[in-house]
Image (cartoon, rainbow, N blue to C red):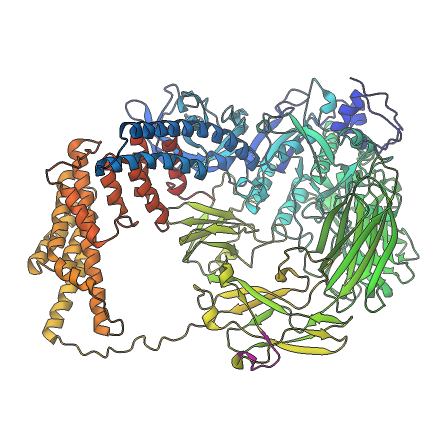
Amino acid sequence: MPCGPSVNSGEHNGSFRNFKLNESTFLASLMPKKEIAADRFIDAHPHFDGRGVVIAIFDSGVDPAADGLQVTSDGKPKILDVLDCTGSGDIDVSTVVKADADGCILGASGAYLVVNTSWKNPSGEWHVGYKLVYELFTDTLTSRLKKERKKKWDERNQEALAEAVKQLDEFDKKHTKIEDAYLKKAHEDLKNRVEILRKQADSYDDKGPVIDAVVWHDGESWRVALDTQSLEDELGLGKLADFIPLTNYRKERKYGVFSKLDACTFAVNVYDEGNILSIVTDCSPHGTHVAGITAAFHPKEPLLNGVAPGAQLISCKIGDSRLGSMETGTGLTRAVIAAVEHKCDLINMSYGESTLLPDYGRFVDLVNEMVNKYHMVFVSSAGNSGPALSTVGAPGGTTSSIIGIGAYVSPAMAAGTHSVVEAPPEGLEYTWSSRGPTADGDLGVSVSAPGGAVAPVPTWTLQRRMLMNGTSMSSPCACGGVALLISAMKSEGIPVSPYTMRKAIENTCVPIGDSPEDKLSSGHGLMQVDKAYDYIQKLHDMPCVWYQIKVNQASKSSPTSRGIYLREASSCQQTTEWTVQVEPKFHEDASNLDQLVPFEESIELHSTDEAVVRAPEYLLLTHNGRTFNIIVDPTNLSEGLHYYEVYGIDCKAPWRGPLFRIPVTITKPEVVKNRPPLISFQGMSFCPGHIERRYIEVPVGATWLEATMRTSGFDTARRFFVDTVQISPLQRPMKWESIITFSSPSAKSFAFQVEGGHTMELAVAQFWSSGIGSHERTIVDFEIAFHGINTNKGEVLLDGSDAPVRIDVQGLLASEKLVPAAMLNKIRVPYRPIDAKFSALSTDRDKLPSGKQILALILTYKFKLEDASEIKPQIPLLNNRIYDNKFESQFYMILDSNKRVYAMGDVYPDSVKLPKGEYTLQLYLRHDNLQYLEGMKGLVLFIERKLDEKEVLRLSFYSQPDGPVIGDCSFKSSILIPGLKESFYVAPPTKDKLPKNSPEGSVLVGMISYGKVSSAVLEEGKTPEKYPTSCLLSYIVPPTKHDEEKGKASSASCTKSISERLEEEVRDAKIKVLAGLNQGTAEEQSEWKNLSISLKSEYPKYTPLLAKILEGLLSQNSAEDKIHYYEEIISAADEVVHSVDRDELTKYFCCKSDPEDEDEEKLKKKMETTREQLAEALYQKGLALAEIEKLKEGADARAASETDAKPDPFEENFKELKKWVDVKSSKYGTLLVMREKRSGRLGTALKVLNVIIQDDGQPPKKKLYELKLSLLDQIGWSHLVLYEKQWMLVRFPSGLPLF
């Protein structure tokens, strides 16, 4: 239905005044194209709609079933390949099985699978593996499935619970008076069943269905089939034999759907000769949305088409599902390899992070190769960290060879896409869009494009399209525009060069905003496809050149930058001279004679303001480049932001516009002269989208500030972005940010850390859509008070000695209250790898375009937790850097001894809660340079453990160095007088207060703070270590105290003769030899048996020997005659029992021993060992008796009558065991479970078993869970059987997961 007439102003940048949408303009606004003139271009050139262009989408994965992503406008397949470059969907299918006579194979999950007889498999070899399906799904999809599955599980559990309650009720009605012991136990069993079902509902934790994967070669290609029965509600669905086999997506371009319930599309790829299966799903809707903006094609609704509907796509998933959707180095590198392999013309990457060093790192090197050698155009998002300056992210906003895109919103987008009440009068940059310049002075944002769209999303979202906004959306919009231009260039035979493309785009933009400073927000302006096309058509005879700019301050060789960025006050108070080197860069395939030698350009240099920036008039530029100097004089500038450019124009072809630019950004700060240092900005007036920037020289000595923001003059709620940024060398920008909503005129206070002596930008912005429809301006008053307590220490290090550390403090700005507080709340334990393994990775996806093979190094670390703890692994060399890192990638997994994965991580490790136990951490490193990896074989890793509250150490302060020893002269607080220094001592923790499990060389870490912020800005519940003045505090754990008693010779005299002692030593040596014998083969078992018989005849009643013989028999669990085997165990156990003088043992434990008497302690240890050997023998005898009973009478144990007069060996043995140990303990409780089971009391058996499992230490024992499964199966609770089977694959995976 029409919404009303539209009024088109005719402006090219999508700016409309006083307009309303109709249906067609509304639909067009959902997928913005008019703003960049893409619609006009396609109308004029319908065959240049992206046809012939292949675009790689580096993102979270693209759903090939999404709306508009099936075919191009000319009928070709839209998506040529779907790849998971991260490895998050990899399955190890190296296990090979053969089908039995019935056509069945044993799946990796343990399920028997029927193979479709029509499938061709000449070799008869089936590769099998399995995957927990939630590992392939997004958190959103998993959450939806869990809710739906929980609802159905609850129904089944409720049915079982109702039946259990019914049985209990019937029992109570039948037996009104229960006095008989057997009936009491039966009643208790029924009650236990009800209790178990109720508790199970509370502890339900769905780890997800398991899918079995089967891979085989049909003689032509690898084929894949999945068994997804566990995902289906209806019996018979999801069977392996019914699956339509898939092959690598690029071959047939077919995909599957796991089930109707999840509606999740997947593709497959097989690598490494059939040993690795990659199941490709997306890790968020983001990638599909990006692909839709770029190139969706909707033949029935062309207004919803993407920008380049004729283009084809390659989906390169760089977001790792194991990490949510975080990109990894592995994913980025493999994506580059795939883009080159597919000969892509263009890449879009709507991902990025902040960076320490711009235009630096392993990925940047690979991108440079793609652009310079393979002529690919690389487009990427600039970031969503605005509105402050210098917030562009890597790689899009910081890499010279990438076109970084800012996000623009037009009035039509505001009205249609965002459905605001009243559209803004003209287009503007989104408030959150990242701004330049980079830390080294480059512009940062190249151009802008519409940053919001309603675009296709994956089918699992249960909707066709969705609204998203961000530079993630502006980048594919610009990428689609570039695709149109490449389509035209290919059709018209114009060579495609990223150098030419970039120049055409940047030099034909429509400016956004009126001031030169707006370039730092929007780049050169809003991209215009039609104008860029006209520009390109004139370039037939022009060289394809990129002009590399390197800038140094005159007489200084470093640092080298790409622009001039005068940010600090000292730089703005003097004239400076800068040396600029302009070096033409040709593509690697350029001809020396035909292109490099003839290259010569007469360049006319221009400055946008010669009063501030002066440059030479002309420059003759050849292939080898030229240098020239420019002079910058900011001394007469007003305070605030100023932007200028020096640019070069081709004298012979001035229409080409600037061939290169040297950005000059000056932020002249206000100096805070008054004391105490206060500054305020009064009466700042805001309308939607307006930004006020203030630059302040933070006074030397300031360490934090306290600010108050007051608003007035408005009616409806207002939303503000408040950012501050400071820049220091070799650090990421120091940024503080807050998003504040004022529902009515009021004030908001806050405090944060600052660095004295550096310029701070304060950016206050009213959100672009906040207050739209209200014509009242918001008035903001902003007041800042700087505070500072300066110390002679940055990080405070306590070296492990008993000496305190002196800290000198002073307040340089104003009087401050000194209130020191110090806390140690974490411990970092260093580990070196116990193993290092190198491997060459598969050439399928890990061979660089240069031909170099990527290598892998797996480092294995072992650590132990004495208690359940929250830990975080840290690798100081590698952490917190993705793009600004010369190493390719890192990935770690934490596993228990059962190979269960508890945590995964990479550059940004997360904390994880782990149960008590022993763990393995495997760290996976990749690079093509073996020397780099060799140097990391001994890489130190820290396991950082969060201390329990009772273990946290709060340190004391003293005014004298002897204070910690004499316990006097404590220091609490003081008032600092400006300019006067005070000192105090922080004492190390006392050794008896150190947390347990603090090994020598580990480091206790925490924070020390010196001052307090005012109560007005102190957030409720804020802990002392979070105060703005806090800094790192460390304590090195010293060597433990020497145990003076250790190693001391025994004072007791030995009463035995030398011959007696020698005989005992010989005996014990023989037993040790027996215990060390292998029993893997029949011959070895025979040797062991002969020796055991010999020793038994020699020492017939020696309990330790008989216990070792029993232990040896227990290890022979592969005997064919099971009954005979268990009878041998019973016989051996009886020999142990009969060798023990139980009366003597009983008498001993009835008396107390003297712990001070060394002989008494030795005797106590001997008697305790004997008791343990006796109990173990009785325990093993009981288990053997139960197994024989089961084997003789079938799978169902006999329900022994409690009143049966016939002696029961099992019961008698059990009663004897009860005399010596707690049969409910985790060590012996299994026998109690067997007793209840054989008596038919399965509910009680299950309850006891659950307690044993809960009390048992880590890692979980597989036998206990197998016993639990058998009990659940016997009771008939099929829903719990299925639940536990899925958990079995989590607790006890068949192998290590792939990296």
Mark count: 0
Location of the N terminus (image quadrant): top right
> Residue 515 magenta-drawn?
no
Left or right of residue 658: residue 587: left
Residue sitting nearer the eye, 674 or 138: 674
Figure quadrant of residue 1012: bottom right
Residue 1086 locus on image (x, y percent): 12, 49
The stretch in magenta equals 957-964
Figure quadrant of residue 563: bottom right
> Residue 963 magenta-drawn?
yes
Q: Is residue 1126 visible?
A: no
Residue sitting nearer the eye, 21 or 340: 21
Q: Is residue 776 above or below residue 101?
A: below
At a point 59% along the width and 44% down the height, the residue shown is: 327
Left or right of residue 1124: residue 271: right
At a point 47% along the width and 69% down the height, the residue shown is: 993
Question: Farthest residue in the left direction?
Answer: 1097
Figure quadrant of residue 166: top left
Residue 257 locus on image (x, y percent): 51, 25
Residue 373 locus on image (x, y percent): 65, 43
Q: Is residue 258 visible?
A: yes
Residue 696 locus on image (x, y percent): 81, 60
